[in-house]
Amino acid sequence: MEKPLAFRPHPWHGIDPGPRCPDVVTAYPEIVPSDGVKYEIDKHSGYLRVDRRQRFSVVCPTPYGFVPRTYCGDAVAAHPVPGTPATSHGDGDPLDICVLTDRNVSRGDILLEARPIGGLRMVEAGEADDKIIAVLLGDPTFGDLADVSQLPHAVVDRLRHYFLTYKTIPGDTRSTITVDPVYSAMEARAVLMAAREDYRGRFEEPGPDRS
């Protein structure tokens, strides 16, 4: 008897965010610090595609991707983060996540378990594009951290610098991107739940949270 065909699940829609979400989540990194090309999930096929070459020396300081079955929509944009510009809508993508680790993660397109400890609200032209900051479970350096306030300022500054500059052409002073302030683990969990609500409203039938 022939075995039934097995198909790879779509990383955005076919992977569960984890039974302990939002305290611990499954993360799908698209890029890692050694990548000279920015990869991004192809929403139709679920495979990584080349989004753009990194034209300048800015590289993401952590594995960077998204939390499956999340969506940045109206609920994320409506979640108040004091000190940020007004947001009218989300960016229409899965919720981004940066996973801190002292280990060399050599490739993306993998699954990690991570604990959210905070986040950055990136805003561009009224669009919310939150970045969850998380730590790799079991990491010898970062794994026991519970809140972004426990991180050295330099680590957060590297993340802020990356998101402030990775789209910027040298000499261009017209950037309207903001990434302040940094928010806490409690806020990160609330943003994750808002992104789960947005995902259910966009892609699933109404019902209780099954994550």
Image (cartoon, rainbow, N blue to C red):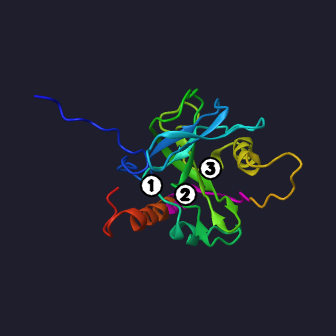
Instruction: Determine whether, in the image, residue 51 is placed left or right of residue 24.
Output: right
Element marked by disc 3: helix
**Residue under pointer 3:** 148
Mark 3 vs 2: CB contact within 8 A: yes
Instruction: Tell me how far mark 3 sits from mark 1, CA to CA.
Output: 15 Å
Q: Where is 25 relative to 87, above or below?
A: above
Q: Earlier in the sequence, mark 3 or mark 1?
A: 1
- Residue stretch rendered in magenta on the structure: 178-191
Residue at position x 64%, y 65% from top? Answer: 127
Q: Of the residues shown, which amino acid type is indicated by label 3?
A: Val
Residue at position x 47%, y 40% from top? Answer: 47
Q: Nearer the viewer, mark 3 or mark 2?
A: 2
Mark 2 vs 1: CB contact within 8 A: yes
**Residue under pointer 2:** 188
**Residue under pointer 1:** 22
Q: Please check the rendered image and state whether residue 56 is part of the magenta-colored stretch, yes or no.
A: no
Residue 75 pos. (x, y %)? 51, 70
Residue 43 pos. (x, y %)? 48, 50
